[in-house]
Image: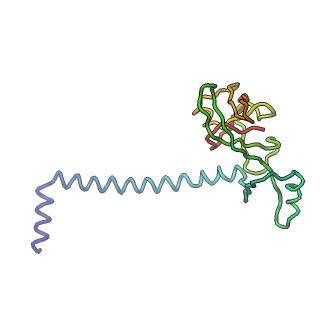
Amino acid sequence: MNVIWHKVWFDLWHNKIRTLLAVLSIAVGVFAIGAIFGMVDQLLPGMDRSHQASQPSHITINLSERITRDLADRLTNIDGIDDIEVSNSVPIRYKLRPDDDWQAGFLEMRDDYDEQTYDVLQLQDGAWPDNDNLAVERLSSEAFGLEFGGQVIFELDQTDRPLVSIGRWPGHRHQPGYGR
């Protein structure tokens, strides 16, 4: 052995605790990386199944101006288009209590929650919204402390209008507001 190997062996043997800590650090790091990659392999199939269960739309088109229902229905006559489900998403300002500051959010609206085709929402509790109430995504309702029958105040045409929460679905939106 040459001088360098004698020095390495001497340092390792005479500093056993430091050597043990270095070996343990490397082992923990290798285990952590293996655990992360193992968890990714476990999570991805579940996420894929969940995504497919919602029947995701293949294309989402956001329009800057309104179109008529007739025009939307005529789009299904284009070759290669099987079906269209129209929904409306509008920016809103809301607050939960009259003294709160206004918050920005989006209100998502659909014609018929019972006959959803794409990006399907599943009702967890309560009822789907109708004219004067709304359903709130589950995590948002928990985060905001919004119970059934609780009100969300919307700013509409310079007036405040409260809507009552009557439903909840498990989802991923972060603002109160799926309604009609």
Report how many numbered discs are placed on residues in the image.
Answer: 0
Seen from the viewer's position, the closer of residues 176 and 18 is: 176
Seen from the viewer's position, the closer of residues 90 and 73 is: 90
> Which residue corresponds to the image point at 63% horizontal and 43% vertical from the top-left?
173
Q: Relative to residue 61, is residue 49 drawn left or right?
A: left
Instruction: Name the image quarter holding residue 102.
Output: top right
> Could you say where residue 100 lies in the image, as x and y percent from the top left?
59, 28
Instruction: Name the image quarter holding residue 27.
Output: bottom left
> Which residue corresponds to the image point at 71% horizontal and 54% vertical from the top-left?
56
> Could you say where residue 97 lies in the image, as x and y percent from the top left?
63, 26
Location of the C terminus by quadrant is top right
Q: Relative to residue 162, is residue 10 drawn left or right?
A: left
Instruction: Name the image quarter holding residue 133.
Output: top right
> Which residue corresponds to the image point at 53% horizontal and 53% vertical from the top-left?
42
Seen from the viewer's position, the closer of residues 97 and 87 is: 97
> Which residue corresponds to the image point at 72% horizontal and 28% vertical from the top-left?
164
Residue 78's place in the image compared with 175, above or below, is: below
Q: Relative to residue 86, is residue 138 drawn left or right?
A: left
Residue 21's place in the image compared with 147, above or below, is: below
Location of the N terminus by quadrant is bottom left
Residue reaching furthest to the front = 158
> Could you say where residue 88 lies in the image, as x and y percent from the top left?
76, 47
